[in-house]
Image (cartoon, grey):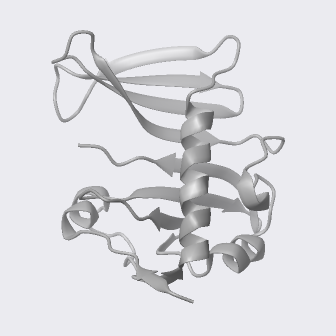
């Protein structure tokens, strides 16, 4: 089976990891696994576009540019972050992150809150990054950075699935 090398640019690593972060592991992934990761990324984007009936919404100035905003929408089992650039008219909204804690939300390939770590690794292989109770799989992209699918564990079960979307 053909494999593609998962490439993470040095710039993405330097920008997204704290100085004391664990080492990112470069891993050969099969086309099938890459396809699963891409499907999971699309699912995260889709979930990020849906909100609960009465969300709590807050906005703050972006750290990188005080003219831009970061909007956070919080629902009982979902949190969505959107970066809002104000240099365009109308302002441009860019999905930045999604945190999912709902065990009822079904994702492609059987992924969901509540599955055990062995299930994830049997489908996706070894993670690119492990930090405490969090493992990360990077989704290959055509641009300078990679989006990531993150699984957070409590007692060996996923209690949160999150997505971080790369944008410039």
Left or right of residue 6: residue 130 = right
Quadrant of the image containing the C terminus: top left
> Does any portion of residue 134 appear in the rendered image?
no
Residue ID at (81%, 45%): 103
Q: Quadrant of residue 123?
A: bottom right
- The percent position of residue 59, horizontal first and vertical second, equals 38, 17
Nearest the viewer among 29 and 58 is 29
Count how many numbered circles sit on residues in the image. 0
- The percent position of residue 42, horizontal first and vertical second, equals 56, 46
Q: Quadrant of residue 158?
A: bottom right
Q: Measured along the vertical axis of the image, is residue 2 above or below residue 38?
A: below
- The percent position of residue 17, horizontal first and vertical second, equals 31, 62
Residue ID at (63%, 58%): 152
Q: Measured along the vertical axis of the image, is residue 51 above or below residue 26?
A: above
Left or right of residue 71: residue 130 = right
Quadrant of the image containing the N terminus: bottom right
- The percent position of residue 83, horizontal first and vertical second, equals 34, 29
Nearest the viewer among 24 and 46 is 46
Left or right of residue 42: residue 116 = right
Seen as rendered, the residue at the extreme front is 1
């Amino acid at each position: 089976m053909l494999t593609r090398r998962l490439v993470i640019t040095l710039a993405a690593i330097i920008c997204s990891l704290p100085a004391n972060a664990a080492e990112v592991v470069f891993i050969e992934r099969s086309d099938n696994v890459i396809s699963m990761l891409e499907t999971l990324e699309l699912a995260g984007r889709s979930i990020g576009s849906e909100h609960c009936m009465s969300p709590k919404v807050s906005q703050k100035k972006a750290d990188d540019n005080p003219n831009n905003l970061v909007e956070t929408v919080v629902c009982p089992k979902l949190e969505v972050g959107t970066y809002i650039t104000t240099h365009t008219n109308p302002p441009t909204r860019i999905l930045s992150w999604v945190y999912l804690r709902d065990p009822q939300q079904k994702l492609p390939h059987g992924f969901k809150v509540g599955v055990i770590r062995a299930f994830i690794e049997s489908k996706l292989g070894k993670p690119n990054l492990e930090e405490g109770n969090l493992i990360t799989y990077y989704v290959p992209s055509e641009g300078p950075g990679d989006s990531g699918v993150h699984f957070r564990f409590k007692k060996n079960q996923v209690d949160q699935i999150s997505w971080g979307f790369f944008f410039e």
